[in-house]
Structures are given as C-alpha cells and as structure tokens.
Image: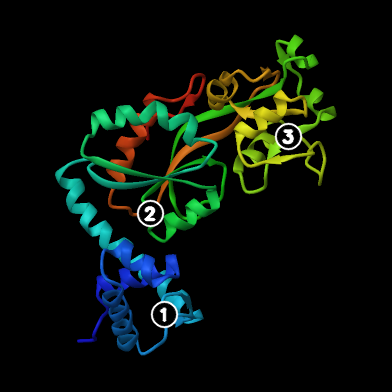
Amino acid sequence: MKPLPTLRQLRYLVTVAETLHFGRAAEQCLVTQSTLSAGIQELETLLRVRVLERRTKRQVVLTPLGEDIVARARRILADAEALVDVAAAAAEPLSGPLRLGVIPTIGPYVLPRVLPAVRDAYPDLKLFLREDQTARLLEQLGDGRLDVALLALPYDVGDLETLPLWDEDVVVAAPADHPFAALARVPEEALAGETVLMLEDGHCLREHSLQACSLIRRPGANESFQATSLNTLVQMVGNGLGITLLPRSAVPVEVGRGAPVVVRDLEMARAARTVALCWRPGAARRRDFRLLATLLKDHAPEKAVVAPDR
C-alpha cells in the first residue's frame, strides 16, 4: 500500500503556510516547535520534495510545488472535516463549530439582529465569524477555511451553491442641507450632476449600487473619494463632501448615529442586490445551512423582499 501523509502532517503544513512562521504555527497547532518541524520534515521525506524553504530557524516561504501541495492539503482537510460534520449533523442540527464568512456591507447590519436568535435556538452551535470582501471569502470557502458565507449577488461564485434570502434596494444619503432633503423621492437623473461618494474597488456593493441606479460608469465620473466602509461614507456625506448610496439595511445603524444626513428613496427604486448564503457543492451540512437561512429570513431587514423557500 502506498504510504500516505497523515492529517496531522497536513495540518502542520497548512498552518505553516498561513503563518509563514514555525513558532506561530506551533502555537496554533498546540504543539512544540520541534514537534511541528519534525512533522514537516517527515512529510517532505514521504513526498520526496521540498515544500518549504527555510529563511531562518523560524521563518519560511513556500516553494512553487509547495503552494500546489498546500492547496491540495486544504481540500483534503476540508473533506476530512466534512466527514466528521456528516456524523455530527445527523446527531444534532446546527451544533459544533461553524465558520461563517460575511461581507462588511452585510455583517454589521444583519448579524446583530439574528445572532441572539441563533444562540437561543441552537445553544450548542459555536459560530466563528470572518468578515472580508467577497473575493477573499470565496477563496476561503473554496479551500475549506470557511463552511458557508453570507454574500450579495449578483456575483460570479463559480460552481458554489447559493440560497437567496432577500432582495434589498439602495437609498440616497445626502447632507441635511442638500436640495434632496426637500424631496420625497429622488429622481434617478438628478444623481448625474452630483458628487457620488462610493466604496473602493473590491466591494461588490459599489457595482450593485451603480447598476441599480443605471449610472453611467466612466473612470472618475461622479467619484472624488473612495471609502473602505459605509460609516466613513456617511461621515463624509455629513461633512458636505457629496452624496452616497446605502443599502437600506445600513440606514438604522449608520444614519442613526446623529450624523447631519438625510435619507431619501429613489423615485424608481429597484432591487440592488440579493443577499444569499453560499457553500461548496455537496457540502455535508446543507441541512444546517438551510436552518440558518430560515433564521436569517425571519430577521430580514425592514422592507426587504424575502425570497420564497426552495
């Protein structure tokens, strides 16, 4: 029988690849540095290749072949964890550890509403949250570092499974003394002459907002500032530097902080994005993800159009 690496050796390798530091990797694996180093050496001997280049006694870099092996190791570990999850899910729904990724334009406005209900309904669930931009969450989901992600569509998620939760529109946020404050609804064409403050590239809300408002996107058109958070955008608007577009779910949190900002619906309001759960095809915990989806739908933001069960 062909000798195979152990899951422990693969875990050591993946952790070293993520930290690029033997000492920190050993701490995360709860072993001594000498134990971790010996495990990596045994793995390299078994594979007959070098996967790491040691720069110092503690710091390392991956070889080109090592990067491919680490990617495969992540998939193997994810499959092994899924095997355990199958057994756990059969015994008790939504129990044990669950790694949930969420994008920054959803997490602060949705999770505080739903997490108390999750804890009450499933006290044995240990939920680990990771907030990041969509592209990085999808990468972590694909290689097994996350179990499920809460994202906004449309977005190319490849072959991952998605479960739509609700549709959400965007609203206009303007300085309190802006002419928009006198309007009940803002005509879409009125945005063309405004300085529109947007999130930086990489945030999918940027594209969703532009598409929902049918704004013509040209390099530099209507944009003089790019922010990393909705809170920064609202503060900039409150200081009279322009207007912005916010997902409706963010309004109670961001505009409720006392900023001199008014919020108005668009005259031709339409859905800007679909909030959805996303997971790997064939995931063992699909039943758990659907239970989580039900709780999320039960606590959907006001005026959100909840998707029918499927």
- Examine the image and state in which quarter residue 258 appears: top right
Identity, as a three-letter code, of the amino acid under mark 2: Pro
The answer to whether 154 appears left or right of 263 in the picture is: left
Which quadrant, please, contains the C terminus?
top left
Give whichever of discs 1 and 2 has the lower sequence position. Answer: 1
Q: What residue is rendered at 73% in x and 34% in y?
A: 197
Q: Nearer the viewer, mark 1 or mark 3?
A: 1
Q: CA distance from mark 2 to mark 3?
A: 37 Å
The residue closer to the viewer here, 262 or 167, is 262
Q: What residue is rendered at 27% in x and 59% in y?
A: 81
Q: Nearer the viewer, mark 1 or mark 2?
A: 1
Q: Where is residue 171 shown, x and y percent of the image?
A: 64, 23
Coloring applied to the structure:
rainbow
The residue closer to the viewer here, 127 or 23, is 23
Q: Is residue 205 above or below residue 116?
A: below
Give neighbour class at mark 2: few <14, some 14-19, many 20+ (Cα, 10 Å): few
- Examine the image and state in which quarter residue 92 appears: top left
- Badges 2 and 3: C-beta atoms under 8 Å apart? no
- Examine the image and state in which quarter residue 235 appears: top right
Which quadrant, please, contains the N terminus?
bottom left
Q: CA distance from mark 1 to mark 3?
A: 48 Å
Q: Is residue 5 above or below residue 264?
A: below
Identity, as a three-letter code, of the amino acid under mark 3: Leu
Give neighbour class at mark 3: few <14, some 14-19, many 20+ (Cα, 10 Å): many
Give whichever of discs 1 and 3 has the lower sequence position. Answer: 1
Secondary structure of the residue carrying tag 2 is loop
Disc 1: which residue: 57
Q: Where is residue 296 shown, x and y percent of the image?
A: 38, 31
Disc 2: which residue: 281
Identity, as a three-letter code, of the amino acid under mark 1: Lys
Disc 3: which residue: 197
